[in-house]
Amino acid sequence: MDGMSLLTITVLAVFVGFEVVSKVSSTLHTPLMSGANAIHGIILVGAIIVAGQAADPWLLAVALLAVVLATANLVGGFVVTDRMLHMFHARKQVAPKEGAGKVEGR
Amino acid sequence: MSLLDPVWTSLLYLAAAVFFILALRGLSSPRTARRGNLIGALGALIAVVTVFLSSRLENIPWILAAIVAGSAVAAPVARRVKMTQMPQLVALFNGVGGGAAALVALLELSHTDDPWVRLAIVFTLLVGAVSFAGSGVTFAKLQELMTTRPVVFKGLPAVMGVVLLAAVAAGAAVILTGSAALAVLLLVLGLAAGVLLVLPVGGADVPIVISLLNAFTGLAVAASGVVLGNVLLVVAGTLVGASGTILTRAMAAAMGRSVAGILFGAFRGGSTAGSTAVSERPVRSSSAEDVAVLLGYAQRVIIVPGYGLAVAQGQHTAAELAQALEARGIEVDFAIHPVAGRMPGHMNVLLAEANVPYESLKEMGEINPQFKTADVALVVGANDVVNPAAKTSSGSPIYGMPILEVADARQVVFLKRSMRPGFAGIENDLLYEPQTSLLFGDAKDSLAQVLGAVKTL
């Protein structure tokens, strides 16, 4: 991929990133941050590529360390975000019976 | 094994990138958030399968073993961690992501002699290392492995300046020579810069730093995408960088401060390095029974939770108290300050865990006018977010930060561990006002005592 196309994609991605999160309510700041955190765990793809090219055992060891770290970021990030969001969901079901006539959440 | 056609590879990466965008968009609304997160996970799965099918890889058994190891460590931790420890876990995951990006860049150095690619490698190394070390220090602060107060020593700005200059010099040398030894030196300098960056940041500012380091890791991943010529990494990293930047700025705005002020304020000795002196003025300390009477015969109670609630794991007791009061016909709401706790929206997550109904959680702009009609404002483990110094004393480090107007309530009750000032280290004059009473003790114990007393009224 040539530099110009890469630059074009990067600039467009900046605008998409600004657009999609610009109106988020502070209620969801934690899951949003945690979700974004999970997404950058995709560095795993890069770690797999370098590990797949490593010829020397020392280089392979470093690359495998990168794979372990990236996997922890990716898997842990998505799992923890899901757990948080599950609670936001569960509250809606529990609220009517415990909250004495409270209506369902937004 | 025959390799996937490059066109298919590109299409699958494109699909993964679109899924990530949908994931972020879904996360910005409570109704679509959980599905959004699952879409993101699906995108990640597609991308990982694609890389195995499309590249000629050696060492596949090793790689698979490493993936299993990483998942085996992270998934159970993510599933079992207490909600109060969520901020440090997110910081930790963020840090290891940055570390992975830095290692990838280090290993790619020998595969290129293009100066532009080397520039991207230098950027990834430095930013990834800063994010790794910075997140590590953040984790240590939040886990209370070290002091939560700002660590400032004489000459810190000078040391930071020297480290950054050395990093620029080493970076330039790596671009010119491609030396692996210099790249390792750069990595070490990046780690040092990350530690120095976060050390002077005080407790109240830590949520913003987590968000900022998250954006840093995003940028490091984007740069590693440039290094590897992988469009998916560029798009995903840039998305996270951009959204992290927005989140950081939104939170800094909620505190009435600039991001630069938070990071560099303490360097100048301004930010959070306030006095720790405890005033000699008298306060009205109260018993659990007195507080229960105040609450039990009120018509409207607003509970203001802060990090003290999280530390004490008191969110369930707080929710029970709210229910007990509601059962007596009292209107109870929770007032949520945007930066209460240790990460953005932290209180919402905690109270959601305790099954507090969504519509009882009120954002600052909505609840502030209502304090005037409240009989009691019950402040549980919060201090800086209700400190009137933010409005009145222009010399105060938190001056300009919007606060919850608890002083407008007829009675204010603070549940506090001690008279120690909040994380920002500033004394709260509200504690000495005539309408204020204090109940000392661990937030959860105090809440349980008050709850017991309310039940016997």
Image: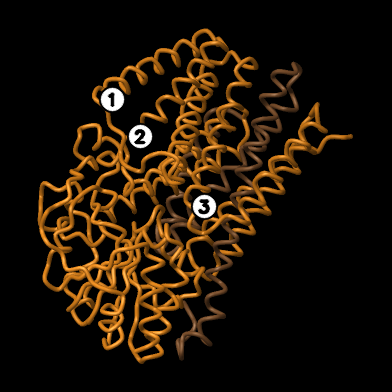
The residue at which mark 1 appears reads as B156
Q: Are marks 1 and 2 on the same chain?
A: yes
Q: Are marks 2 and 3 on the same chain?
A: no
Is B446 drawn above or below residue B89 in the view shown? below
**Residue A34: mark:** 3
- Identified at 76% across, 44% down, the residue is B49
- Identified at 59% across, 51% down, the residue is B20
Instruction: Answer with the quarter of the image where residue A83 lies.
Output: bottom right
Do tag 3 and tag 1 residues touch (Cβ < 8 Å)? no
x and y, in percent, of residue B85 in the image: 50, 53
Q: Is residue B93 visible?
A: yes
User: Along the horizontal axis of the image, is B226 left or right of B57?
Assistant: left
Is B330 drawn above or below residue B206 in the view shown? below
Is B446 drawn above or below residue B215 in the view shown? below
What is the spatial separation of the Cα atoms under label 2 and label 3, in whole angstroms?
23 Å
Name the one closer to the observer, B29 or A11.
Answer: B29
Q: Are there few (<14), some (14-19), or many (20+) residues within 10 Å of tag 2?
A: many
Chain with brown colouring? A
Chain with orange colouring? B
Do tag 2 and tag 3 residues touch (Cβ < 8 Å)? no
- Identified at 57% across, 55% down, the residue is B81
* Mark 2: amino acid: Leu
- Disc 3 sits on a residue from what chain? A
User: Along the horizontal axis of the image, is B79 left or right of B186?
Assistant: right
Q: Earlier in the sequence, mark 1 or mark 2?
A: 1
The residue at which mark 2 appears reads as B199
Name the secondary structure under disc 2.
loop
- Disc 2 sits on a residue from what chain? B
Q: Are there few (<14), some (14-19), or many (20+) residues within 10 Å of tag 3?
A: many
**Residue B294: mark:** none
Circle 2 or circle 3, nearest the eye: 2
